Image (cartoon, helix red, strand yellow):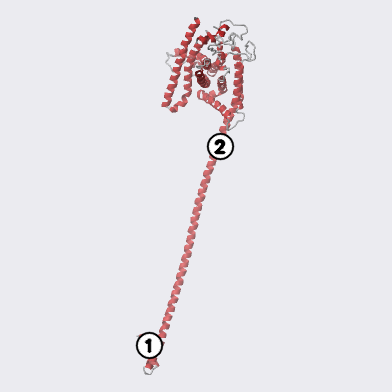
Amino acid sequence: MASETTAAHGAAGAEHAAEGSSLVFHPMDQFIVKPLFGGDTIAWYTPTNVTLWLFFAVLAIIGLLVLSTSKRAIVPTRMQSIAELAYGFIYKMLEDICGKEGVKYFPYVMTLFMFIVTANFLGLIPTSFTTTSHFAVTIPLALAVFLTVTVLGFVKNGAGFLSLFWVSSAPLALRPILAIIELISYFVRPVSHSIRLAGNVMAGHAVIKVFAGFAAVAVISPVSVLAITAMYGLEVLVAFIQAYVFTILTCVYLKDALHPHH
Amino acid sequence: MEGDLAHIGAGLAAIGSGAAAIGVGNVAGNFLAGALRNPSAAASQTATLFIGIAFAEALGIFAFLVSLLLMFAV
Amino acid sequence: MATEPISEEVVGSCVDSHGSAIGMPQLCFDWFPNQIFWLVITLVVIFLVLSRVALPRIAAILAERQGTITNDLAAAEDLKAKAVEAEEAYNKALADARAEAQRIAAEARAEIQADLDDAIAKADAEIAAKAAESEKAIAEIRAGALESIQVVAKDVAAELVTALGGKADADAIAGAVEAQLKG
C-alpha cells in the first residue's frame, strides 16, 4: 500500500524514477481530463476527452433509438426491440411510480436514463474515459433533478408542497422534529443522488485499476487477471443498476413533487 | 507523519464499505425471504428492493469516498 | 498533498509533470466548467433528439403494433364467428337433407306398399276366379264322367246279357243301369 500511495501522490519526479521497477499504482489517472488536440489549458470550451466520450454517448443513443427504429418495422429487428424495451422499461417505471400525470415528464427521465446508461457502458470499454465517474457530471444531473422537482412542486401545489415536510400521520408533538429531519433529508437528496452514481462508477474503475497494478508481478498476475474479470462482470451489473437507481429515484422525487401529501 | 495518519484514517473509513455490504445483504436477504413466502407479491416490489439496496450502498460509497479523500486529497 | 510544486509545462494544477493525477481528478475544480459546459450541450442534444425524433417514433411504432394486433384479433374473431355460422348452416342443411331423405323413403315405402296390396288383391281375385273356373270344369268333367259311365255300363250290361245268352232289351237294361247307379 505504501508504494501505491506514494505513486498515486505522484509528487516529485525523483520519486517516480526511483520506483520505476516496483509496483506502481495510478488508480486515479484514468479520470484525468486531457485536451483532445494538445495544448495546455482547459478552458470551459476546450474539446477534451470528456467531450469525445460525451459525443460517443450521443452517437450511441442516436444509433440505438433513432437509426434502429428508422424502418418502423411492425416485427422489430434486434436493435429496434432493444430501443422498444428501453422505452417500455422507463415508461412503465414512470407510470407505476408517478401515475398518469408523470408521463408528461417522460422525455426528461428518458434523457437522464439513456445518458447515464450509455455513458456507464461506454466507460467500461478499456482505455475509455468514464464521464459519469466525475462529480462535475453527476452533480449537475442531480441538481437538475433537484431544482426541477422543487420548482415543479411549488408550481403544481403552491405552498401545499411544504406539506411534504409535515408528516400528518405522526403524533403532533413529533411533527416539528420530523419536519426538520425531512427538510434535511430533502436537501441531502442531490448530494447522495450524485455521489452514489459517481462513487459507484469511480470505485469499480479504481479497483480494477488497482488489480491491474498487481498484474505487474508475475506470480500474482493470473489472480489479478481473474480478479479484473470478476470486477468487470460486477461493473457491467453496476453500470446498469446505477442508471436504473438514478432514474427510479428521479421518478420517486418527481412523485413527491406531484403528490406531496403523505 | 501527517500523511501516515491520513492513511490509517483511510483504512478505518474503508470499514464502512464492509458495513454497507452487511446492509445490502440484509436488504437482499430479507427481500428473498419475503419473496419466497409470497412469490406473487415479489415482482411488484423489485423497484423497492433496488431503492433499498441503493440507499444502503450509497452509505458504503460515502465511506469509500472518505477513504479516497484521505488517500489522495488530504 | 495537492499543494506540492508543479512545473510549468503541466496541464493544470491537478496533474503533475509525469501526467499522473494529484489527488482526485474528480475534485479538480479547474476542469469543472469544461465538463459542465459539454455535459449541458450533450444533455440538450439528447433531449432534443429523444423528444423530437426517437420517442414519438417509438411510441408510433408501439401504437401501430398494438393497432395491428387488435385488428388481427378482431379479424380472427370475425373469421371465427363466420366459421361458427358456416358450421351451423352446414348442420342445418344436413338435418334438412336427412329429413327429406326420410320423407322420400317413407313415401316410396307407402307407394310400394299400395302397389303391393293392389297386386295381391288382384292376384287373389284372379286366383279366386281361376279356382271357380276350375271347380266348374271339374264339375263338368264329373258330370261328363257320370254320363260316360251310364253309357259304358249300359253297353257292358247289354254285352254281358248277350254273352250270357239272353236277349238284351235296351229299355230294360237302361232302366236297370239307372236304378243301379242311383242306388
x 49%, y 53%: residue: C98
Between disc 2 and disc 1, whose residue precedes?
A: 2
| Label of residue C11 in the image | none
Tag 2 secondary structure? helix
Q: Mark 1: which amino acid?
A: Glu
The extreme left residue here reads C183
Tag 1 secondary structure? helix
The extreme front residue here reads A219
Q: Mark 2: which amino acid?
A: Asp
Location of residue A123 by image quarter:
top right
Seen from the viewer's position, the closer of residues A121 and A67 is A121
Residue C72 pos. (x, y %): 56, 37
| Label of residue C72 in the image | 2
Contact check, label 2 and label 1, Cβ < 8 Å:
no
Seen from the viewer's position, the closer of residues A183 and B48 is B48
Q: Chain of mark 1?
A: C
Q: Mark 2 or mark 1: which is in front?
A: 2
Crowd around label 2: few <14 · some 14–19 · many ≥20 (10 Å):
few
x 57%, y 27%: residue: A83
x 42%, y 79%: residue: C139
Location of residue C56 by image quarter:
top right
Seen from the viewer's position, the closer of residues C160 and B3 is B3
User: Which residue is under mark 1?
Assistant: C178
